[in-house]
Image (cartoon, helix red, strand yellow):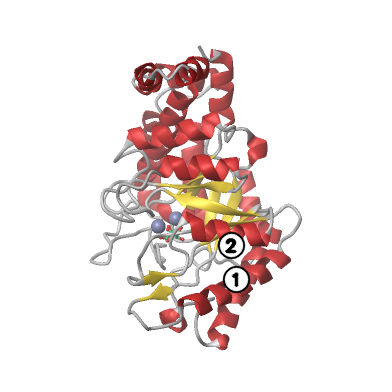
């Protein structure tokens, strides 16, 4: 059986990075439902993120999205985070919201637009220098809507050129994480549609280019844990964008739709050494809380990732390997199911108590009165929104 002290140590050292945009207003293409008390600027987003960390103890890092989180002084923003016991994490580029990007950004047929997009990506690296962030996370909305609209491989050439220029600009301790997505907003071809495309570009770029697996970005039925195992084997798994999907890129709370899939993914992470901090796998959330209260929803998501992590760490690997080696299919499967069916909530409550935390993070947050305070105080100004 796994050593309980090691399981607990792994649970307390796991870092779950929360997205700044998860604290702002968001919606679907049909409607954004505004909530009261939502942050009005990136500083207030960090204030909310600090509450999530205070309640859970494992969420000390916040991803930024530029220009949604553009500020005058990024050093001051990093200082604001540090004062609240958190820090700034991945910088997400945004080359999908200008009119100029209608036909693409770095793969656009017009060199002027490509230059503008590249300049933005380079600006993101400047921001990383100021914030001390390790990761540049790139997601491109680029693609085409109609057969014949543009040349598939010419677009790959343009993409490779831009990625090469950004890679050359990275500092020695910085990484480029390339995210893929099957479709949307492009509906015919997408320029980085799958892990294979992302992997091929990262392989050519070098060791500091790695792939991000957003759990909502695959066709139904795709075996995400296989992708995770393979990328870890190749040293190319940079991290995750965790969220849940029922249909496509739903961006619902991680672990809400399919906790068993999350467990299977994290089992591959555990088995392949991906929880060791030196492996550098980033555990990010990428989700939007459109109809539910935002801060408790982020807390719930963090807890869901923790629960799946605990179950993954409880898999008896010796028993699993013995069963696999002897070809005992049912015994091997039973080892996994035993771990998955373990109620790990008492273990996590114990871990939290040992850290001096309330065993129930949602109750801990509610007891702070923070929600009432932000509803009362954050009046005036414009609420920050996803896409704003
Ligand atoms: C888009 O579908 C991706 O998941 C990106 O990670 C994106 O930057 C993020 O979802 C914010 O919109
Ligand atoms: Zn994502
Ligand atoms: Zn997405």
Using the numbered discs, state the Cα–Cα distance from disc 2 to disc 1 in whole angstroms.
7 Å
Q: Is 248 on the left-hand or right-hand side of 135?
A: left
Give above or below for 122 relative to 364.
Answer: below
Q: Can I make out residue 368 in this image?
A: no
Q: Quadrant of ligand 1?
A: bottom left
Question: Which residue is depicted at the point 45% across and 72% down?
Answer: 142
Q: How many marks?
A: 2
Q: Report x, y in % for residue 8.
A: 54, 20
Q: Can I make out residue 77 in this image?
A: yes
Q: Report x, y in % for residue 206.
A: 69, 57
- Residue carrying label 1: 160
**Tag on residue 338?**
none
Does the residue at mark 2 contact the one at mark 1 (Cβ under 8 Å)? yes
Q: Quadrant of residue 174?
A: bottom right
Badge 1 marks a residue whose secondary structure is: helix
User: Front-most of 292 and 1?
Assistant: 1
Give above or below for 387 relative to 298.
Answer: below
User: Front-most of 169 and 108?
Assistant: 108
The C terminus: image quadrant? bottom left
First along the sequence among labels 2 and 1:
1
Q: Report x, y in % for residue 271.
A: 53, 29
Give above or below for 57 relative to 79.
Answer: above
Q: Residues within 10 Å of mark 1 (few under 14, many from 20)?
A: some
Give above or below for 224 relative to 348.
Answer: below
Badge 2 marks a residue whose secondary structure is: helix
- Residue carrying label 2: 201
């Amino acid at each position: 059986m796994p050593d309980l002290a090691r399981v607990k140590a792994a649970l307390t050292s796991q870092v779950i990075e929360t997205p700044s945009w998860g604290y702002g207003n968001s919606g679907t293409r049909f409607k954004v439902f505004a909530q009261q008390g939502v942050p009005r600027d990136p500083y207030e987003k960090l204030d909310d993120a600090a509450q999530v960390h205070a309640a859970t103890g494992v969420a000390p890092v916040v991803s930024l999205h530029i220009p949604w989180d553009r500020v005058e002084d990024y050093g001051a923003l990093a200082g604001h985070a540090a004062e609240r016991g958190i820090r700034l994490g991945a910088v997400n580029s945004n080359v999908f919201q200008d009119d100029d990007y209608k036909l693409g950004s770095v793969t656009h047929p017009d060199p002027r637009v490509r230059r503008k997009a590249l300049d933005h990506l380079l600006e993101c690296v400047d921001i990383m220098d100021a914030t001390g962030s390790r990761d540049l996370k790139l997601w491109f909305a680029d693609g085409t809507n109609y057969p014949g609209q543009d040349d598939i491989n010419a677009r790959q050439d343009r993409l490779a050129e831009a990625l090469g220029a950004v890679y050359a600009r990275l500092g020695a301790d910085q990484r480029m994480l390339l995210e893929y997505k099957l479709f949307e907003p492009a509906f015919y071809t997408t320029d980085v549609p799958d892990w294979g495309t992302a992997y091929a570009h990262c392989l050519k770029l070098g060791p500091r280019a790695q792939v991000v697996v957003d759990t909502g970005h695959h066709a139904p039925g795709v075996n995400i844990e296989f992708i995770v195992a393979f990328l870890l084997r190749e040293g190319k798994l940079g991290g995750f964008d965790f969220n849940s999907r029922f249909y496509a890129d739903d961006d619902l709370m991680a672990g809400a739709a399919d906790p068993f899939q999350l467990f299977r993914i994290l089992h591959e992470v555990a088995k392949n050494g991906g929880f060791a901090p030196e492996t550098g796998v980033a555990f990010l959330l990428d989700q939007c809380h459109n109809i539910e209260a935002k801060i408790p929803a982020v807390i719930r998501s963090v807890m869901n990732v923790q629960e799946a992590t605990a179950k993954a760490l409880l898999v008896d690997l010796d028993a699993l390997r013995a069963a696999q080696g002897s070809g005992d299919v049912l015994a091997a499967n039973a080892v996994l199911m035993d771990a998955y069916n373990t109620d790990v909530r008492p273990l996590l409550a114990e871990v939290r108590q040992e850290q001096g935390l309330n065993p129930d993070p949602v109750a801990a947050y509610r007891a702070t009165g923070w929600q009432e305070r932000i509803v009362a105080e954050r009046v005036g100004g414009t609420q920050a929104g996803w896409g704003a």
